Image (cartoon, rainbow, N blue to C red):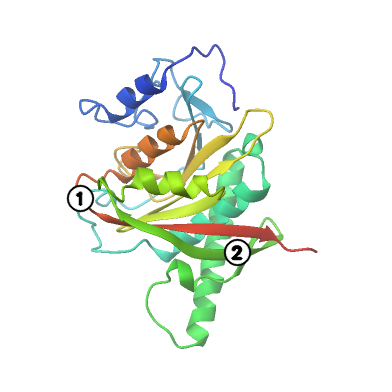
Amino acid sequence: MWQGHNEKPTSTRSMAKDIAHPERPLPPWSRLLDHNAEGCLRRRSGEKEEHYEVEISNHLWSLWGTTQQVNPEKNSSSLESASGRTSAPGQALACCVIACCAGSFQSLDSWDSSALDSIMLNGRGYYNESLANRQLWVRTGELCLECLNTTCFLDGREFWVDIEKFSTGKLYSRTKSLGSALSVFFGQHLQTGILQLRDQALAFGLIPEFASGGAFFLFHCQARGKPLFQDTKSAPYVLRMRKLQQLLYCILITLDEKRHNVPFRIYKVGCVPRAN
């Protein structure tokens, strides 16, 4: 659920301290923690939470898809990619596009665990269809965002998608930082986008919600093992927050990139449902 029980006000500065404090080894939303940032116990690992969980009262909520068993490997958010990739896998990019479609026509208040599973299922289908079309032209190599089909499906609804590079920059740069790029993105009243940094990608957006005053969100589906899960576990998840600064902190923790001046790219993603 969106509003947690017995929530107490917490300042943005306090949230930033909780998330970015160098002595805190795990993100506040890590499934390896049996409690949230305020000490409230989570559900036991065998009990699936279908709706939003409170991570930091009035500031941060999390939602999780079905946990999958995966082969143990080095975390993709470490300093060097285990696969040596310099771009995100095509299937992860496709799932991010589907998440943007979901955000463009579904209220965040209605999202649940099943919605995330549906995003993953439809994302895999979108990737496979895009790959098949690419192979018709005898092209090889991994799919990039610009190579994905211009139409996709989510739960039987067809979408036309327009993906365009919006900006580039370097992480923690003084002039073209991620924070300034996000400010410009939302300053132009754009709704959903995809961020790529080395071998990682995540979807993000600002979804107007009349009842709750609006909400930023972050969708990520590449996390496996530590620091979020046990070594052989993985699951898609969404983080939801109220302020842009909170979104920035969560993105930086998710990317877990320690080096400065690492290039990133932001794409704007327009999603329009096609008339039946």
Q: Is residue 240 above or below residue 224?
A: above
Is residue 238 in sight in this rendering? yes
Q: Who is closer to the viewer here, 194 or 226?
A: 194
On residue 79, which mark appears?
Answer: 1
Q: Nearer the viewer, residue 270 or 57?
A: 270
Q: Is disc 2 placed on a helix, strand or loop? A: strand
Residue under the image location 49 percent in, 75 percent down: 131
**What residue is at 38 percent from the left and 72 percent from the top?**
142
Image spot of residue 262 (x, y percent):
24, 54
Q: Is residue 169 above or below residue 235?
A: below
Q: Is residue 170 left or right of residue 268?
A: left
**Callout 2, which amino acid?**
Val
Contact, CB < 8 Å: mark 2 with mark 1?
no
Quick check: 226 left or right of 270? left
214 over 127 or under it: above or below = above
Q: Which residue is mark 2?
A: 161
Q: Residue at x 51, y 45 (%)?
A: 187
Nearer to us in this view, 9 or 189? 189
Separation of marks 2 and 1 at Cα, in angstroms:
32 Å
Q: Position of residue 166 (x, y in %)?
A: 45, 59
When asked about the image quadrant of residue 80, the answer is: bottom left
Query: Which quadrant of the view contains residue 232?
Result: top left
List x then y, in percent, for residue 206. 55, 42
